[in-house]
Image: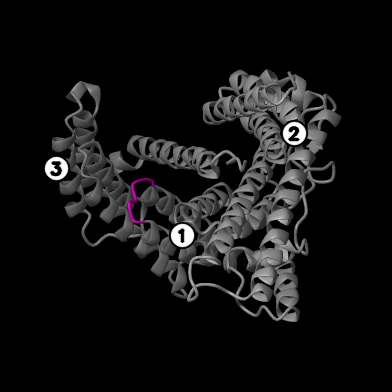
Amino acid sequence: MWRRAINPRSTVFKLIATGTGLFTLSTAYCYVFHVRTSYKRDPLYYKPVRKALWDESNKGQFNHSDALTQYVETLRGLKGRDPLGEPYTRIELKIAEMLENMGKYDEAHSIYLEMLYRFFDALVTPGVIPDLKRPEFIRKDLRLLIKSLEINTDIELGKKNLLAHLLLVQEEVMGRSPELKKFFDERKRKATSNGLGKNHSDLSGSNLQDILNLKFFKTVVNDENIKFDENGYMVLDMEKNSTAWEPFKEEFFTARDLYTAFCVSSHDVGTALSCKMTTLEWMVMADMPPGQILLSQANVGSLLYLQAEKYEAEIEKLKSSSSIDDTTKITDDTMIKKLRSLNKNRDSCLQMANECYDNIIDFSKKNRNLRYHIKDQLDPAVSQSIALSTYGKGILNLHRGSLTKAERLLKDSISMAKETDFTELLTEAENELKRALLIKEQIITKSNNNLPL
């Protein structure tokens, strides 16, 4: 029986929540800092903002409506100021925040979008943003993008905005990073030599079929990419130059995970998988925290399993449609060719998913601090990646019919999920364990019924 792996959307959106939390906290910090400094130097700015801050606080009994009025008044007073400048944009953010607090999400979303388009136009128009200020403006643009998607209800609009802004940042980084430019040039060269042209995703840099043919696939969790201190704990690779990604790399990878999640939500698993694999490689180049790299590879494994499910569904659909009627029936040769291709792709996905999980589990066994000092890890992503990989191995064994091994792995993943408060995984693992035990019980019952009297 075919078993579903943990829904990659759950894990991806868990990371997204972290990213949007980063945006919210950063915005709050910058805003409070600005209140204490710049506002006092501008009477037109300070007086209404001070009253608005009072109104929206517990001292003002969280009167968001009056606070909104004060912020709107402040914005009117800033007419003629730079619409990309700090005072103007901060007040716009506060207006949107008050609207959200009042439950007016569509109106708040409209403000975020208007700001987002304004920043995008400024970044793509030559000469508007000085070169030295572009990195910080890109960071603000990505934060606006993430914030707008937090309350977005239109998946296609979300994907469209993500694609436009991520490609903009991608070009910016390539101009600053010879390593990334070489990466893309090499992928494009291989794609062209394989006759793929521009069919591959602009955000992935690789075609799904090439991935399935193992041309671009490789795991990244190894001693070369993950560094340790003298006590055996993971640290950033200080020798790696990641300045091309600064100061917006956290926001950039959060946005890429959002794009992956939106693709999964729209059932475009192939694009999600290609994008996530490329994201994983770029995270290594950008010297992202080791725990995020491990968890990202575990999520690649989950996406690979989800893609394998799609191929399995296509196989079953093809088999059933061949006998519906004469108009839908396909020739045996055509059917055989399609089935071979689908089976090969499915098996490739399962093989690569297994490699993703094995790579993380073997790495954790080799470096014992990762597995046996879970509570000491400052980054929960480390333990979550091990738990998710253990769960993934359990699902793969369940699919292969290795019930005893699947049961053991699922129980291990449940223990780790409980220890690390990985609630999304805990629910999935417990459900799959119940299914595994039920199948095992059915097999035993059937075997006993067939015994000779």
Point 14% across, 42% down: residue: 69
Question: Can residue 256 be seen in this snapshot?
Answer: yes
Point 78% across, 39% down: residue: 358
| x, y percent for residue 219 | 77, 49
Residue projecting furthest to the front: 453
Q: Please name the residue that numbered disc 2 is placed on.
A: 402
Front one among 264 and 227: 264
Question: In the rendering, which numbered label is found on residue 127?
Answer: none
Is disc 2 surrounded by few (<14), some (14 to 19) or many (20+) residues within 10 Å?
some
Residue 128 sits above or below residue 379 on the image: below
Residue 197 sits above or below residue 159 on the image: below
Q: Please name the residue that numbered disc 3 is placed on.
A: 69
Amino acid on which the number 1 mark rests in the picture: Leu
Amino acid on which the number 3 mark rests in the picture: Thr
Amino acid on which the number 2 mark rests in the picture: Ser
Q: Quadrant of the C terminus?
A: top right
Range shown magenta: 150-154
Q: Tag 2, which secondary structure? A: loop
Q: Please name the residue that numbered disc 1 is placed on.
A: 162
Point 62% across, 41% down: residue: 1
Badge 1 or badge 3: first in the primary sequence: 3
Front one among 249 and 216: 216
